[in-house]
Image (cartoon, coloured by chain):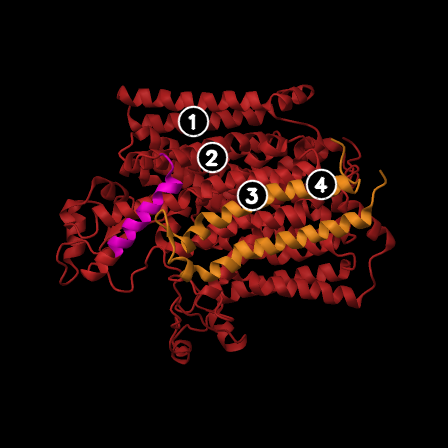
Chain colours: A red, B orange
Amino acid sequence: MAAQGQSSDFTSNLGRVYAIYTGGFIAFVIFIAILEKMGVPNQILGYLFVGFTIAIYAMIGIMSRTMQVSEYYVAGRKVPAFYNGMATGADWMSGASFVGMAGSLYLLGYDGLAFVLGWTGGYVLVAVLVAPFLRKFGAYTVPDFLSARYGGNTARLIGVIVLLACSFTYVVAQIFATGIIASRFLGMSFELAVFVGLAGILVCSMLGGMRAVTWTQVAQYIVLIIAYLLPVVLLSAKKFGIPLPQLTYGSALQEIAKLEQGFIQSGLAPATMKIHTAPFTSYTPGNYFALIFCLMVGTASLPHVLMRYFTTPSVREARISVAWSLLFIFLLYFTAPAYAAFSKLEVYSTLIGKNIADLPAWVYSWGKLNLVTVCGKAASSADAVKAACGAISGHAGILRWQDFGINTDVVVLSTPEIAGLPYVVAGLVAAGGLAAALSTADGLLLALSNALSHDIYYKMIDKNAPTARRLVVSRFFLVIVALLAAWTASTRPADILSMVAWAFSLAAAGLFPALVLGVWSKRVNSAGAIAGMLAGFGITMLYLIVTRYFPGFGVTSLGMTSLTNAAGAPLIPDMAKALAAPGALDGWVLASHPLASKVGWLNMNNISAAVFGLPVGFVVTYVVSMMTPAPSKEMQDFLDEVRKPRGNTMMEEKAA
Amino acid sequence: MAPNTEQHWARTKSLMILMMGLWAFFSFFIHMFVTSLNKIVIAGFPLGFYMAAQGSLLAFVIMLFWFARAQDKIDRDCGVAEDD
């Protein structure tokens, strides 16, 4: 797999290569387990885990180095459907999915399943509406297609702007996640860990572009899925005698339901407590369905996902590859609710209603990191807990439901400890979380730097750039974007991290109408698409920024009203009074501002902003197209060609 | 066999509409009845919760493998499939 001439050897031996790799990884885990038995300290085991896995990724990255343009941008279009599915799985599942998803399900109960549904169902749209056609066209980037279909660089430039807006905050969050995971498990400082993560990302992507990222993502998928499934499989086997947590957590749900009723009857929890399986306790039904819709359409528009399907050998394989991707993603997402249920059962059956002096050790070990709170304070020690609860008047020293707080990351990270598994499993989970964050960061960085180097530099600035210079420019942008993202992450930017959820709505409203109508309608033209992208993206951006940063202005000038809670009570009962308060009409307000993210149109949370931007995008694209002349005969022939799988890709590389 | 592009696109469109219908059913429609479905409990799972946590996801996976085959059959029937 080292030299280019041998790459066909590598692709024909993929099964054996990755079987050996998986076996080697399992042997390594067993080796670490033996070291642990021999008394090697945990911190050294942690370093071995992280060091060994990153070294493997780096080795794959270096062996996949390339100087060919089509290898760099689309891995030579030689990635079989099955392996592209694994790579997409790793590309898609972020550090937050791996570490935080189960925790969100713990906190939100049924309503959290909007994320599980949204992040899987979107692949149906990818397979049916978009990906196979982009593969047939033969794009290197998503803006490539927009430019060819909508004749020119205006559509390309808008595509690049949408791509930058949705991908940059996302990559910052991934690098932030690598920093958190590395610092927590290795005891490094967070800032140092961020730059170690950066090195891990660059070494995988810089020399080999898409080709290197593809083969490291496959390796990272294998690590992350083993790491995610193993602890909860062992826990299920231990508790229920069956190693299938996805089936056995039904019993856990029943026990949780009984405990919930008991807590309410005995006064250990308020009657308003969230029942785990009850719907619409966190979101109104409208917001629940809007969120599912925006996440799904966003999935089908995010460039770092779509570009993975440019790498398959054929249109047929692109379609099968989407199915494999979803299967590999499904394995993690249908396990996450099991983690949530087991953790909740553990908390409800061993903590709530017990004396605060008898809390198990894991509470303190996460409390020290301020990730578990008891009576509103970090549960750093037995004394701290006693003091915090003592400060609440009338507290009987018995832990109530509302006394216990848990950070979403803890659910996955603490499962090995709760299940009484050795440290080696916790180290494995850390390696898995790191693999998830690194692989997603790689995909995003490549999407960003390819847009800058291929779309902006090559297609818009220097059309005659020689191959060697194009590849140098690509790597230059890759390093610059990576450094910028790592620097941003190292400042712990709370605002940017909370903007990650915006990426789905921005991508959906900015790109989806232009991509889908571009394939499925012969009547939609350049003017319509450009107007539609600007309108959809503009409305979504406006809604996000106004509701979050200019809420007072939104109420006074844009007709926004108070959002309600799930039960329908307004978050701001007296709007006139709230607006009269000092500072209510300020701009660029902090997240703690009394109106921030609490106002909107039609009671829609801003995470679902695309419910406005997407229809606007579709309508504007269509109406403006109908008011302007139909696309030329050449463009209609071009579309006929895009719709037919047979034949070569339509965008041919001149040099390579 | 001569490619039949018109028939190909007509059949592709019908398949697309069918897939979008199934997608809407498993993404939204079924979950509108979560409260009633939750009264049915199978192996500990309230059915409404199960559909959102596993049922719809499984349906998506099966749908996509089926779709890849069905679309390939259309491509082959109409003579526009890629060479194997």
Instruction: Give the residue pinned by disc 4.
Output: B73
Q: Specify which label sits upstream in the sequence, 4 or 3.
A: 3
- Do labels 3 and 1 touch, CB within 8 Å? no
Instruction: Give the residue pinned by disc 1.
Output: A51
Res A221 seen here:
yes
Please state which of the two labelled residues, at mark 3 or mark 1, is closer to the viewer: 3
Please state which of the two labelled residues, at mark 4 or mark 1, is closer to the viewer: 4
Amino acid beneath label 3: Ile
Both marks 4 and 1 on one chain? no
SS state under label 1: helix
C-alpha gap between disc 3 and disc 1: 38 Å
Q: How many marks?
A: 4
Please give left or right for residue A428 compared with residue A331 in the image.
left
C-alpha gap between disc 4 and disc 1: 48 Å
Amino acid beneath label 4: Lys
Any mark on residue B62, and which? Answer: 3
